[in-house]
Image: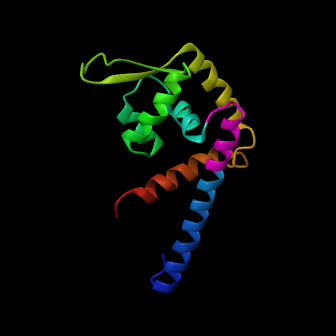
Amino acid sequence: MSTDPEAAATAERELCGLVNGLSRQIEEHVRTRAATLGLTGPQATALRELTGPMTMRDLADRMSCEPSNATFVIDKLEKLGLVERRPHPQDRRAKQLVLTPDGTAMRARLLDLLVQGSPLGGLGQDEQDTLQALLLRARQPH
């Protein structure tokens, strides 16, 4: 690791640019694929992240947004008949979000589309695993 502040700042700036650029590419990829299914980018993100029953807060965490934003997205998906709210089995104050059969089918179509031309598609599985491990490590407090 460099002790020269200027070199460290340059390296950090370049890395941040790469991470932000990749993030924008992924968001654009999700948006364009979602549009082919009549969904918005946030709706597609919610469907992608609904890997099983979960609370709104859990979904918001996975979507990296506030619960109120996730609620807005889920309201739209619920009107489309793709998601329903059910009583939480352990917490009667909470609701669980669950995909309907149509939601499960839509999610499967979405996942198929998302892997086609993915910005991460040029990386092998080992490379993706390494990138994920490095990003997780970088997020840890120092």
Residue 27 is a magenta residue: yes
Residue 122 coordinates in the image, percent (x, y) = 73, 49
Q: Nearer the viewer, residue 49 or 66?
A: 66
Q: Nearer the viewer, residue 126 or 13?
A: 13
> Farthest residue toward the top?
101
Is residue 4 in view?
no
Q: Residue at x 38, y 57 (%)?
A: 140
Q: Residue at x 49, y 34 (%)?
A: 73
Is residue 28 in view?
yes
* Residue 116 picture quarter: top right
Q: Residue at x 58, y 35 (%)?
A: 44
Residue 24 coordinates in the image, percent (x, y) = 61, 55
Residue 25 coordinates in the image, percent (x, y) = 66, 53
* Residue 21 picture quarter: bottom right
Q: Residue at x 63, y 33 (%)?
A: 39
User: Which is the main secondary structure of the residues drawn in magenta?
Assistant: helix
Magenta segment, which residues?
Answer: 26-39
